[in-house]
Image (cartoon, grey):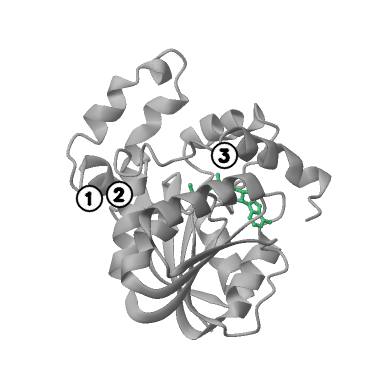
């Protein structure tokens, strides 16, 4: 598969982590707990799901029990292969991981009942063509769950710098700007969950190195922790550094 020069830095980052990516931490970080929850909450055992930028299938594996079939697509074949090995080990037969470019999906219109994409649209050179493809392949009325980044929280700069070190761009939006973009590609936001408002310390020099603060802010192992409560207050939510948008395809 041809990978364009602007896609190479993220591809190299994934190749380096192909064997270890994510499996060690699915339930430790609050974002991951919520991803699992949303996959379950918006599931239907009859439906066909698409995981866009699936990496080694860490979320496809979590989705598998809740959907008829999950197709994962990713650019990086090394990380996909590690996921295929894992699927074989776990004897999961309703997940397929394919090397495809999400900018040009090889699926017909309305092929899926739902699609989700986590930690992808914020780190690709061009997010709009991927959003357009997702909207095209999900049937009208089907659900789309997207993990998107907000630009108006100070920690946005921290994440931008973190990815810039790897040569990877960081796409972050103002809340209304993002709703507009989703509307333009044919995705209607139905519910938005905010995260990370309490993580303001990430943007502060020295303090950002105090890893223990993470444990304080996300102290409980519950979904509804202090950060979630604050990040979803009216008026505050639009300033969150991360949102999960649950949309309906038009
Ligand atoms: C930061 S990882 C996130 C992986 C996983 N979804 C997660 O939540 O941990 C981003 C993934 O998107 C994939 N990716 C980037 N651009 C892509 C594209 N145009 N088509 C398919 N996959 C892409 C990368 O190869 C990488 O595996």
Instruction: Give the CA separation, mark 2 to mark 1.
Output: 7 Å
For residue 107, which quarter of the picture?
Answer: bottom right
Instruction: Determine whether the beta carbon of the residue marked 2 sits less than 8 angstroms from the nearest atom of ligand 1.
Output: no
Instruction: Give the CA separation, mark 1 to mark 3.
Output: 28 Å
Which badge, 2 or 1, comes first in the chain's sequence?
Answer: 2
Instruction: Give the CA separation, mark 3 to mark 2.
Output: 22 Å
Residue with the mark numbered 2: 33
Residue 77, relative to residue 140: is it above or below?
above
- Residues under numbered marks 2 and 1 in contact, where contact means CB atoms less than 8 Å apart: yes
Residue 172 visible in image: no
Q: Measuring 65% from the left and 50% from the top, which residue is drawn there?
A: 77
Name the front one of labels 1 and 3: 3
Instruction: Determine whether the beta carbon of the residue marked 1 sits less than 8 angstroms from the nearest atom of ligand 1.
Output: no
Q: Measuring 36% from the left and 46% from the top, which residue is drawn there?
A: 31
Q: Quadrant of the N terminus?
A: bottom right
Residue with the mark numbered 1: 223
Residue 16 percent across, percent down from the top left: 61, 32
């Amino acid at each position: 598969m041809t990978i364009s020069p602007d896609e190479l830095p993220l591809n190299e980052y994934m190749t380096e982590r192909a064997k270890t990516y994510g499996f060690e931490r699915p339930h430790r970080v609050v974002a991951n707990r919520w991803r699992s929850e949303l996959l379950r909450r918006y599931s239907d055992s009859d439906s066909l799901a698409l995981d866009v930028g699936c990496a080694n299938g860490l979320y496809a594996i979590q989705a598998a029990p809740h959907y008829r079939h999950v197709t994962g697509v990713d650019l990086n074949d090394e990380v996909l292969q590690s996921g295929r090995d894992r699927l074989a080990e776990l004897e999961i037969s309703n997940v397929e991981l394919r090397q495809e470019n999400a900018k040009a999906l090889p699926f017909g219109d309305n092929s899926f009942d739902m699609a989700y994409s986590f930690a992808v649209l914020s780190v690709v050179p061009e997010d709009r063509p991927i959003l357009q493809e997702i909207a095209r392949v999900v049937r009208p009325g089907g659900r789309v769950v997207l993990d998107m980044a907000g630009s108006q929280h100070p920690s946005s700069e921290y994440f931008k710098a973190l990815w810039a070190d790897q040569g990877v761009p960081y796409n972050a939006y103002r809340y209304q700007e993002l709703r507009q973009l989703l509307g333009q590609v044919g995705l209607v936001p139905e519910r938005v969950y905010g995260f990370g408002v309490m993580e303001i310390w990430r943007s502060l020099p020295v303090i950002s190195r105090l890893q223990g603060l993470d444990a304080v802010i996300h102290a409980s192992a519950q979904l509804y922790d202090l950060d979630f409560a604050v990040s979803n207050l009216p008026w505050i939510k639009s300033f969150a550094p991360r949102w999960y948008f649950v949309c309906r395809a038009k």
